Image: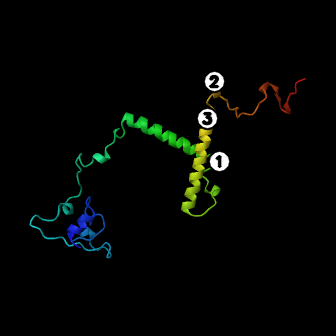
Amino acid sequence: MTCSTACAISAATCPAAAGRVQCPLKTSSLGRDTRLPLADPEPSPAGPAKICTQQSITIPPEAGAQHHQTLPYGGGDWQRTYFRLRNSVEGFNGFAKDPLHEAIEQPGTRRIRGIAAQTLLLAFQLAHANRRKIDRWLATIPPDGHPPHRRPTRRRPTKPLGSWTPTGHLTSQ
């Protein structure tokens, strides 16, 4: 294999430095793995190819425009946007992990083997969680100008502390 062929395989880094070929110009790559092909650097009056001699590359802004971000990483605007999105995702994960409903964290709720089947059943569980969340939201919308339906409180009724005795509660007479 010629060095130009090997360099065409990986344009970002030297293939010998990446551990894909053995090359006499990079002595650390020789003898690592005998299954790797041996690159034969073509002699040139200009010397070895640039990729064989440099350790890093510089990408100009024109070439890296596809990786441009609208919000600079770590800035105040980026943090506000990122953390708001992250909080909504984590909040939904907690909602879907509720052990009384979908319990997506428990793989025992999907008793089937295989990653494809597990993924399909997990998708159904997440669709059900989405539907449950939408139904809860729709229940808060006031129908026809009436006040919105209020969910009952989840607290159980308690007795006042003044009616407690060591043997139980006082009964009203």
| Horizontal relation, residue 20 to residue 147: left or right | left
Question: Which label sits in the foreground, 1 or 2?
Answer: 2
Real-space CA distance between mark 2 and mark 3, rounded to the nearest whole angstrom:
14 Å
Give x and y (percent) for residue 144: 64, 26
The residue positioned 62% from the left and 57% from the top of the image is: 110
Which mark is first along the chain, 3 or 2?
A: 3
Amino acid residing under circle 3: Leu
Q: Which mark is residue 99?
A: 1
The residue positioned 57% from the left and 53% from the top of the image is: 122
Q: Do the numbered discs 3 and 1 sit on residues whose CB atoms are within 8 Å?
A: no
Kindly identify which residue carries mark 3.
138
The C terminus appears in which quarter of the rendering? top right
The N terminus appears in which quarter of the rendering? bottom left
Q: Secondary structure at mark 2?
A: helix
Of residues 70 and 160, which is closer to you in this image?
70
Kindly identify which residue carries mark 2.
145
